[in-house]
Amino acid sequence: MSIVLLVVDAGNTNITIGVYDGDKLLSVSRLYTDRGKTKDQYAVEILEIMKLNGINMPEFTSVIVSSVVPEITRILIKAIKQITGLDAVCVSVENSAGLIIDIDSPTQLGADLIATAVAAREKYPLPCVVIDLGTATKISLVDEGGIFRGCAIAAGVGISLKALAAETSQLPAISLDAPESAIGKNTITAMQSGAVLGTAYMLDGLAVRFQNEIGEKVSIVATGGYSSDIVPHCEKDILLDPTLLLEGLKIIYESSINS
């Protein structure tokens, strides 16, 4: 009997839900992260998503959860228990597939960064710069020994645009499209240049700084909801891996049952 694994990543904007049958990723879905929802509400929404994807909840044999939203972590785990009958494996510093975390306070490292680092360690040449373009923009370094060395964190593209529209009188909400020129000729193209091209060059620049600081050539991989919008405009050779975090969760789960 194959392991049918439910992988769940709770982020500040979305909850990403993946289903693995053995090594095959059957589906990826997303829920809006709502800190006001109850256990029953999350249970109903997850059931509806599974039904939409033609997946029966009794098929699951295992569950793993990562969360950077403490307010909903316990509620989400209880909802999953209610509909699957399974206790979830939870990602933490103590349960991280042997990832060594070389930062000032390892317990402060988010479960999402743990999962993407674990996946990058297994999939890509090291040292590796791991970029996660989500609610926040996170750029991490996994060194040649597979050790997590640290990261840089900036406001995400979506947050930056919302802040501009909300906190200024004359700047509108805009779509996340790249302008033809970095030199904007109107308000919208100027904002798009700053958001898309500015973020792209920040990623290029930080990758170079990371590489210079460790004195070794790095591979670079990007994931997260905004990665497909930004990475094509970077000058560095950056690989897109939309399911990197989910793969990290799968690796961590397999490590937890084999340890």
Image (cartoon, helix red, strand yellow):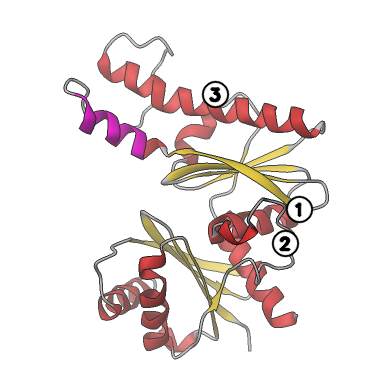
In the displayed structure image, the side of residue 159 where residue 151 appears, left or right: right
Is residue 62 toward the left or the right of residue 178 in the image?
right
Which residue is painted at 67% across and 57% down in the image? 119
Q: Position of residue 165 (x, y in %)?
A: 23, 30
Identify the residue at horizontal 36%, vertical 76% (top origin). Answer: 75
In this view, the mark in front (1 or 3) = 1
Disc number at residue 211? none
Residue 9, how many percent across, how many down?
A: 47, 64
Please give the residue where the numbered disc 2 appears in the rendered image.
Answer: 99
Q: Is residue 162 magenta?
A: yes
Q: Quadrant of residue 72?
A: bottom left
* Total tally of numbered discs in the picture: 3
Q: Which residue is mark 1?
A: 147
Q: Nearer the viewer, residue 179 or 126?
A: 126
Between the C-alphas of marks 1 and 2, the distance is 6 Å
Q: Main secondary structure of the magenta part?
A: helix
